[in-house]
Image (cartoon, rainbow, N blue to C red):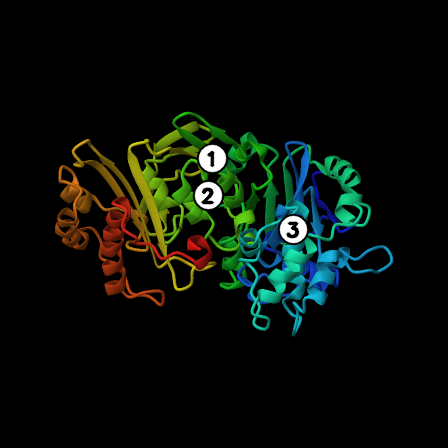
Amino acid sequence: MNDSIRFILNGEDIALANVGPTETLLDFLRMKRRLTGTKEGCAEGDCGACTVLVGRLADGKLAYESVNACIRFMGSLHATHVVTVEHLAGRDGALHPVQQALVDCHGSQCGFCTPGFVMSLYGLWLTKEKPGRREIEKALQGNLCRCTGYEPIVKAAEQVSLQRPSALFDPLQRTRSEIVARLWAMQASGTMRIASGEDRLIVPASLQALAEVLSEEPDATVIAGATDVGLWVTKQMRRLSPVVFINHLSELQSVTESDDGVTIGAGVSYSRAFEAISSKIPALGRLIDRIGGEQVRNMGTIGGNIANGSPIGDSPPPLIALGATLTLRSLQGQRRMPLEDFFIAYGKQDRRPGEFVESVFVPYPKAASRFAAYKITKRRDEDITAVLGAFLLTLDEAETITDIRIAFGGMAATPKRAPTVEAALIGKPWTEASIDAARPAFDADFQPLTDWRATAEYRQLTAKNLLTRFYLETVGAPAELKRFEEVA
């Protein structure tokens, strides 16, 4: 059937033939199903009170991820298993070990945020048998609590890793094979088109079908993770139609490694990209770990971050510094370009009518090169960038700069190279004197704006200081502040 969105909600099959393109999972759960354990806090994917798990078949296996229901659109849920906090209790009503641990460790006070914490910890419990504190904190990056100070919640996570009853107790482990069979039966055989009044949503069946749809609908909004577009709806109250959902397309989910680099499909989430990148480009892996919370990284995609063209997007500056190549696709075929050439002006990218981002090739830094990326925010985790600088340096045997690529976000209307600074450094010795001499060149490359995240003066000084920091780190100076557990 290609006339309805079909998915499993806890244990029930759902089919929706009348669904709007921007209807959120949160509104569906609370208003239409009365599953009020899923809360609305921020409505922008920050607080985690709306956290649920979504399971999807990938490479024949069923995998569950925590997501923000407040910015997850219903059109992205076809052939998935949505799990809410109401599904966790045992058949006799007994609390799940994750829930019981929060009770035992006094991890809840007012209780508003508790269901979201339960679902994030449940997602961790399903995937990590004995998580360490860093893994627990990473799983909870996207959940905010005003009451507990987090320590009781972390203790609950540590306690529950020691309590693993029979798999028959857990609802997802007990029914896994059954859920897999039901999801296979829901797979669409063709492109899905659903109209609700004047609103339309489209779920293409393949990459070729996507090209055909965008040829017919060049002004359609294409959605993979909706971590940005979701806010257009929940905060700006924008009406979007038609909307084309692509998060299910396996052709956009590929990660292909070679000796020279890695090709990442436009539909690959930050979480999956981290797995592919972190060991080969550690600095980029550390940056990905600071993009949103776990729920946002499970939904958001590098391809979407590029296609959106935001001047404060986190992935373009480091990818530009690394010399990434972008592949666009349409009915006319593929088109490749250096990623830096894709960004033309604020809100304008080099994407022709009917084209979409298909993949990005990220070269690995050469063994002799040095690479770093620095994200400056008001708080370390789950915050939007004020300034982001990325640097790729190549020196010869005499420690002379043979090549340097510098790219920034938050400093211009687009992610942007610093050509004047680069020219001031190439051919010079890699010394503090060369760095100091090049700092004024930033004034020719960037004229940043003042907004509520930072003043223009702060951004300009910070960009210069990040070059100095990069130099200090490359010569072994302790330029980066470390968290206590990283130095203990």
Q: Looking at the rendered structure, which numbered label has been put on residue 77?
A: none
Q: Amino acid at mark 1?
A: Ile
Q: Amino acid at mark 3?
A: Gly
Instruction: Give neighbour class at mark 2: few <14, some 14-19, many 20+ (Cα, 10 Å).
Output: many
Q: Is residue 479 above or below residue 366?
A: below
Q: Identify the residue position indicated by label 2 in the image.
A: 302
| Point 71% across, 57% down: residue | 98
- Residue 455 or residue 485, whichever sits in front: 485
| Distance in Å between CA atoms under marks 1 and 3 | 25 Å
> Is 138 positioned to the left or the right of 177 in the image?
left
Q: Is residue 355 above or below residue 287?
A: above
Instruction: Give neighbour class at mark 3: few <14, some 14-19, many 20+ (Cα, 10 Å).
Output: some
Q: Position of residue 213 (x, y in %)?
A: 54, 37
Q: Residue furthest front?
A: 488
| Point 18% across, 36% down: residue | 399
| Point 74% across, 57% down: residue | 97
- Residue 162 or residue 55, whichever sits in front: 162
Q: Nearer the viewer, mark 1 or mark 3?
A: 3
Q: Position of residue 104 (x, y in %)?
A: 72, 66
| Distance in Å between CA atoms under marks 2 and 1 | 8 Å
Quadrant holding the N terminus: top right
Q: Amino acid at mark 2?
A: Ile
Residue 471 in view here: yes
State which tag comes first along the sequence, 2 or 3. 3
Residue 19 in view here: no
- Residue 344 or residue 131, whichever sits in front: 131
Q: Position of residue 83 (x, y in %)?
A: 71, 52
Q: Looking at the rendered structure, which numbered label has been put on residue 123?
A: 3
Q: Identify the residue position indicated by label 1 in the image.
A: 264
